[in-house]
Image: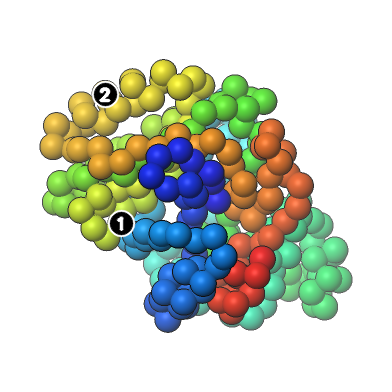
Amino acid sequence: MYATDGDFDLHSLVIAADMPALSALLLDQLPALPGIARLRSRTGLAWHGGARWQLGAIDPGQQRAVADEAPEDRQAARTRLFDADDRALFLALQRDGRARYRDLARDLGTSEHLIRRRVDALVRRGMLGFRTDFARGEAGWPTEFVLWLSAPPHRLVEIGTEIGGWSQTRICLSAVGTANLMVMVQVHRLADITAVLDRIHATDHDITVADQRLILRAVKSWGRLLDPAGRTTGLVPVDPWAPTEIVINQ
């Protein structure tokens, strides 16, 4: 959740378990909130990069040291859904991604052996991942933009994959609509956005920028509530399976 300049005051990414939940959120719940004057939504299609933000803070040897030993089984992931125990583990790890297996087992009422097996299986299939986040401003990345691009549909995946691999890209997501690519970029200075836009144009001259907005303040990032300096003040876990009413109340 982000406060922005431009025609709209807030920019938010939401995750829903299915279309009925998404429809209820967009058509019923959000318009009913006090203070909501206008709402514009675009439905995401696929992630093209940015979920694993690579800043070059560790060298190749350090990267190998923390890399998964076993390759992710993406094909197996497509044949498995999160069950109730997976969901409970997912929510527990959002509270503390460094929690010990024995503590997770105690909190979830199961054995340490089963927790270890479940974590390993979900990570191997690419269904569960871990990341380190930080106060962006204190690390020299105080400025963030939201860009909506119109890219040639036949090159959407190729363009999204390329832009998603840039060091400035936080999120790159294809979407339904004429503006079919949403890119969130993090830069050191306001003026740096010019170089990003030039690079986008050089990627494909048919790309147009449908909208660009400066993020004035990040309010929430992957479940973590943030203060004006970008430090965490609390947690509202990302829970795609929560009833829509609970999501809104939070």
Q: Which residue is rendered at x = 31% and y = 41% of the image?
A: 211
Residue 201 found in image quarter: top left
Classify 10 Å Cα crowding around label 2: few (below 14), some (14-19), many (20 and above): few
Instruction: Tell me if I can see residue 201 in this picture.
Output: yes
Observer-nearest residue: 174 or 61? 174
Q: Nearer the viewer, residue 78 or 5?
A: 5
Q: From the viewer's perspective, is 219 left or right of 27? A: right
Could you tell me which secondary element the residue under label 1 belongs to? strand
Badge 2 is on which residue?
198
Q: Quadrant of the C terminus?
A: bottom right
Q: Residue at x 58, y 34 (%)?
A: 63
- Front-lying residue, 39 or 191: 39
Where 158 falls versus 37 (above or below)? above
> In whole angstroms, how far apart are the C-alphas of marks 1 and 2?
22 Å
Left or right of 165 on screen, residue 151: left
Q: What residue type is labelled 1?
A: Ala
Mark 1, other Cα within 10 Å: few <14 / some 14–19 / many ≥20: some
Residue 95 lies, with reference to residue 241, above or below; the image says above
Q: Mark 1 points at which residue?
A: 175
In terms of sequence position, does the residue under pointer 1 or pointer 2 come before the other?
A: 1
Residue 129's spot in the image, x, y percent?
58, 54
Spot occupied by residue 80 in the image (x, y as percentages of width and height): 48, 76
* Occupied quadrant, residue 5: top left
Q: Which residue is drawn at 45% across and 22% down?
A: 190
**Does residue 119 show up?**
no
Q: For mark 2, give the secondary structure.
A: helix
Residue 84 vertical placement versus 171 (above, below):
below
Q: Which of 141 and 67 is in front in this view?
A: 141
Q: Position of residue 172 (x, y in %)?
A: 38, 45
Residue at the location (19% across, 38% down)?
207
